[in-house]
Amino acid sequence: MSQKTKTQSNRNRKGRIATDKRGYCGPTAITVLTGRSMKRVEKDLIDQHNKSKYGSRKPIDAIKGLSKAKMTGYLKFNCKLTVDKIFQGDELWPMYHKKKPVKTAGQWAKATYGKRGRDFFLMVVGGRYRQHYIVIKGLRKWCSFEKPEGVSIKQWKHFKGSKVHQIWKITKEKNPRHLYNPLKHSPYEYFGKK
C-alpha cells in the first residue's frame, strides 16, 4: 500500500509543478510544460550536459544556469514540442497597451488578456545577471516560488514587475519528425514550406 502511494506521488501532469523534488526555475518550468517528474528532467539535463563539450564543468551548472538555448532545445528535441519565439510588436507581445509601453511581465499579462487562448507561454524575466523562467497559461502562472497548482494572475507576486526578456509559445508538435515517412508524405506538405 505504501509503495503504491509513493509511486503515485511521484507522477505529474501538464500544468502542474512536479512534487517529487524541489528544483530550480528552469527544470520547474519544464515539469509544468511536459508533465515529467523533476528527477527525470534533471537527469536528462545532466546527461545532456555530460555529453556536450562542457562536460568537464560541474553537473549542477546544467540545472542551475539553464541557458535559453538548452531550454528550448530540450523542449524541441526531447519533448517533441513546437517552440515559437514571440517578438515585441507581434499581437501576443504588443509594444503599447493603453498608450503605455509593455515592458514588465505584469504589463504583458494585461496587454494579452483574452488573446492567449489555451496555449502555454514560457517567459524569461529578470535583470541583466539574474533571470527567471515563468510559465503562463490562460489566467494561471507557475514558477519555482509557487505551489504545484500555480496561482492565478491576480495573486501573482514574484517577478510581476520584472522586465520581460523573451517569450515563447509552446504547443504540441503538429507533424512529429519521428513519424515522417518519405514513402507516404511529401516533405512540403508535412513540414510546410520554409
Image (tube, helix red, strand yellow):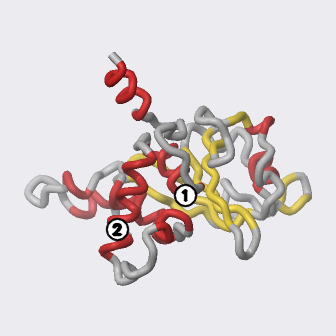
The residue shown at (43%, 40%) is: 35
Q: Position of residue 4 (x, y in %)?
A: 33, 22
The residue shown at (55%, 46%) is: 22
Q: Nearer the viewer, residue 48 or 88?
A: 48
Note whether 120 is above or below 124 in the view shown.
above
Q: Is residue 179 left or right of residue 176?
A: left
The residue shown at (47%, 39%) is: 20
Contact (CB < 8 A) between labels 2 and 1? no
Q: Position of residue 26 (x, y in %)?
A: 55, 58
Q: Looking at the picture, which amino acid does disc 2 mark?
A: Gln
Q: Nearer the viewer, residue 25 or 10?
A: 10
Within the image, what quadrant is residue 100 found in?
bottom right
Residue sitting farthest toward the top = 1
Q: Looking at the picture, which amino acid does disc 1 mark?
A: Gly
Residue sitting farthest toward the right = 99
Q: Nearer the viewer, residue 146 or 73?
A: 146
Q: Position of residue 122 (x, y in %)?
A: 58, 54
Q: Is residue 150 left or right of residue 189?
A: right
Can you identify the residue that label 2 sits on? 48
Q: Position of residue 175 (x, y in %)?
A: 30, 51
Cα separation between marks 2 and 1: 15 Å
* Residue 169: image tag: none
Can you identify the residue that label 1 sits on? 26
